[in-house]
Amino acid sequence: MRRKLAAGNWKMHGLTDALAEVKALTDAHPDPDVDLLLCPPATLIAQMAWARGTHALQIGGQDCHAEQAGAHTGDIAAAMLKDAGASHVIVGHSERRADHAETDADVAAKAAAAHAAGLIAVICIGETLDQREAGHALAVVTAQLQGSLPEGATAANTVIAYEPVWAIGTGRVPTLDQIGEVHGTLRAALRDLMREASGVRLLYGGSVKGANAAEIFSVPDVDGALVGGASLTAADFSPIVTALENA
Ligand code: PGA
């Protein structure tokens, strides 16, 4: 059985006052029936770890460097995220792939660094609209999965997030059949790539809201969501958490 995961990616949003949302969220879900993860900007990780108190909320970074330390101004090592209170780190988000020209090999190296530091890597993959319209979505995500999964990936240290680029922040969501087709394809591909493939959690991400969460969570092989905009406030994120608990 895979434990479901509701993950929030705050991206480049949030100052100290946003921690009030963490309190509201943990108050609304004192003992959640699913794993709850928030990935704030790195500047808020330590404060969020303090703010959660004894709550089971998990905290993640949004990126890490592939090396453990070195002359890399502005970058953050996985061990630093862990030291600040993180247990997870997102790697290979499409915004990083686009803004920083990260390749699958870069993403695999970052995921390996996350594992070496004892973090769970949330590896993101997803096709562009052009790729989907050309009929290449399944081939693209399968190749990204193969290229982005490091040696040593296990069900315990790796989560995969399928995020079609054209669905992120756009309000456009694939059909449930399209989501199911991709997740089924990824599950089968994982079986060829690693042991324990059936234990790896597959998240869907891209314009998940309270209003569409329940139907998305009804799709087989969807083990939760990676949520951007709707994770910024407890009012928006809480219904998604509840929908996942009820799935
Ligand atoms: P969105 O972002 O929920 O705002 O579409 C999802 C993501 O980028 O993880």
Image (cartoon, helix red, strand yellow):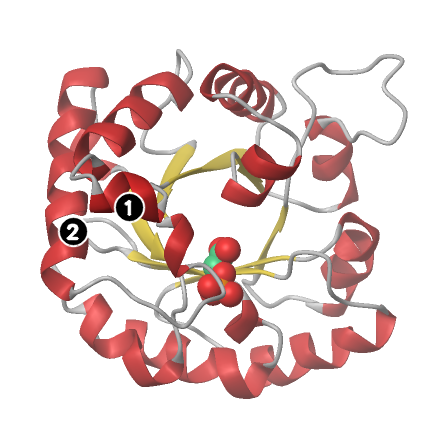
Q: Is residue 31 above or below residue 124?
A: below
Q: Which residue is mark 1?
A: 202
Q: What type is the residue that disc 2 sits on?
A: Asp
For residue 146, the mark is none
Q: Are marks 2 and 1 in contact (CB under 8 Å)?
A: yes
Q: Quadrant of residue 199?
A: top left
Within 10 Å of the Cα at label 2, are there few (<14), some (14-19), or many (20+) other Cα atoms? many
Q: Residue 35 at x, y = what percent?
A: 42, 60
* Left or right side of 185 for 233: right
Would residue 19 be seen by someone viewing this image from the given angle? yes
What secondary structure is found at the residue carrying circle 1?
strand
The residue positioned 78% from the left and 32% from the top of the image is 80
Q: Which residue is mark 2?
A: 221
Q: Residue 7 at x, y = what percent?
A: 47, 59
Would residue 29 be seen by someone viewing this image from the given angle? no
Q: What type is the residue that disc 1 sits on?
A: Leu
